[in-house]
Amino acid sequence: MAQAAVPLASSTDLIAGEIQQRLGEGGSEIRVRNETLDAEPLRRFYQRRGWHSAWSEMTEALLAVLAGAEADGLPVSSFHLNTLKSLLQTNSAAGLAERDLLLTDGLLRYAMAMRGQRIDPAEIEEDWFLTVPAFDAVEFLNENAKKLPTALLELRPLYAGYQLLSQKLVELKAVAAAGDWPKVPPGPPIKPGALDDRILDVRKRLAAAGLDAAPLGEPNFYDEALQSEVQLFQRRHGLNDDGVLGRQTVQTMNISAAERARQVAVNMERWRWLPARLEPNHIVVNVPGAWLEVVEGGKAVLSMRVIVGDPEHPTPALHAKMTSLVMNPIWRIPSSIAT
């Protein structure tokens, strides 16, 4: 005699039972398909739901959100992405429970990462005095369960600087995947007006960065047009824009796209430590670039160079409400600078 199909209600109960059993084992972690999951937030999330699965109707949309985190410099492997993809076609109660648990853990990690909770800045930045705002990822998932793909994307920082870094990260990863950009051989400094075989390599390197390095005549002649592009490259990278192709400029040109991508990802992490939004009127200091920008009504109205600390005496990072601003303050030049 043919066995009757299990009613849908019974299958959801079976999945809930599997989830409850997995989370009832105790301990701070559980293992699912060779992945390590944080058990305590999962218990909080599923207990409130009566242990029922959460994402059966939007699994693929949520996986797309997690995959997109690569453009945020986040390691998508920490969201169990490959394991989740391998479970897309599963239909057993145990498999569906595992998929839901893995996905929830990945979503919790994603939400926490987007709100600056992935790394404690105080552990790696001694002079970081910004407090990362508290964020309850479990509560966030519960409150936004019906519209979670959209809600997760809205966690991304809205800063224009963050969006530009994200675009640059995608570009850098593409360059690295294609075999990196051209390298400039080391050698003596090259000054404008010189004729040097390495100038063609410089042109190729600048062209890879999106600069206009096409020769006006002899490709190996360092002409004025190329000098302007070299100076622009130097300014972009915080170098002295003297137009001389010296050791530091060439070394900077030869930093790999993969290393640049890593640097961009680190800076995107720092952006996520900031408050979700800044006031329409604010002042921001770019410490590595040593410049200040005044923003009024959400638009930059003034920028200028500023003095910042060095690695041994770094400028502290902070976020605070300003009540006064001293213009042209008295500053006694330290003897180390004066002499």
Image: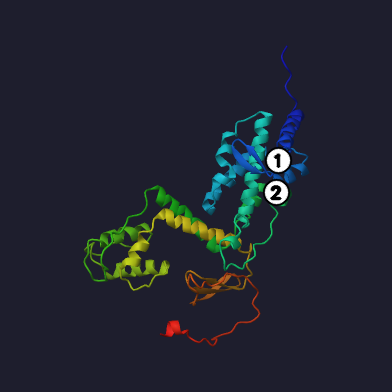
Residue 324, placed above or below residue 23:
below
Cα separation between marks 2 and 1: 10 Å
* Amino acid found under the numbered disc labelled 1: Ala
User: Where the C terminus falls, by quadrant?
Assistant: bottom left
Residue 274 position, x and y percent, is: 61, 64
* 25 relative to 169 in the view: left or right: right
Residue 255 position, x and y percent, is: 38, 58
Query: In this orientation, which residue lies closer to the viewer: 231 or 314?
Result: 314
User: Where the N terminus falls, by quadrant?
Assistant: top right
Residue 286, placed above or below residue 334:
above
Query: In this orientation, which residue lies closer to the viewer: 17 or 29?
Result: 29
Please name the residue shown 75% across and 33% down the image: 17
Please name the residue shown 42% across and 69% down the image: 238
Query: In this orientation, which residue lies closer to the viewer: 143 or 97?
Result: 97
Q: Which residue is mark 1?
A: 54
Q: Which residue is mark 2?
A: 141
What element does badge 2 sit on? Answer: helix
What element does badge 1 sit on? Answer: loop
| Residue 187 badge | none
Residue situated furthest top in the rendering: 1
